[in-house]
Image: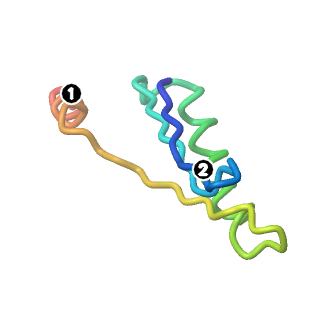
Amino acid sequence: MRHEVGGYEDQKGHRIVGWVTCEIKDKESEWNKVTYMLAKYVEYANVGGNKTRGYGVTRLIQSFHKDNAKINSQGE
């Protein structure tokens, strides 16, 4: 699994915006299924948005890479 974390800091050094990008190469792995399930739960549970302390908003965005499409279409 590859991941990337980003964001920026305000003048006091507080991190105020951030994001995480995860990529799992093996689409059939058990870890992919578990990671996807947890990501969907976090989105459903709304751990960030509309909370008193304002922890942020969680959103799952699935992407479909062109290279994976070729591999999948050849495998069928």
Residue at figure coordinates x 42%, y 30% from the top left: 27
Where is residue 11 shown, x and y percent of the image? 63, 55
Callout 1 crowding tier (Cα within 10 Å): few <14, some 14–19, many ≥20: few
Toward the right, the furthest residue is: 52
Q: Tag 1: residue type? A: Ile
Towards the viewer: 51 or 1: 51
Callout 2 crowding tier (Cα within 10 Å): few <14, some 14–19, many ≥20: few
24 to the left or right of 65: right
Residue at figure coordinates x 42%, y 23% from the top left: 26
Task: Write down the quadrant of residue 67 in the picture.
Answer: top left
Residue at figure coordinates x 71%, y 63% from the top left: 48
Secondary structure, mark 1, is helix
* Distance from the alpha carbon under mark 2 to that under mark 1: 40 Å
Which part of the image, by quadrant, shows the C terminus? top left
Towards the viewer: 1 or 26: 1
Secondary structure, mark 2, is strand
Tell me: residue 75, above or below residue 46. Answer: above
Residue 9, disc = 2
- Mark 2 or mark 1: which is in front? 2
Residue 7, disc = none
Q: Are marks 2 and 1 in contact (CB under 8 Å)?
A: no
Q: Which residue is mark 1?
A: 71
Q: Tag 2: residue type? A: Glu
Where is residue 12 shown, x and y percent of the image? 70, 53
Where is residue 72 shown, x and y percent of the image? 24, 32
Residue at figure coordinates x 53%, y 48% from the top left: 7
Tell me: residue 65, above or below residue 63. Answer: above
Tell me: residue 52, above or below residue 21. Answer: below
Task: Write down the quadrant of residue 50 in the picture.
Answer: bottom right
Towards the viewer: 59 or 31: 59
**Earlier-in-chain disc, 2 versus 1:** 2
70 to the left or right of 35: left
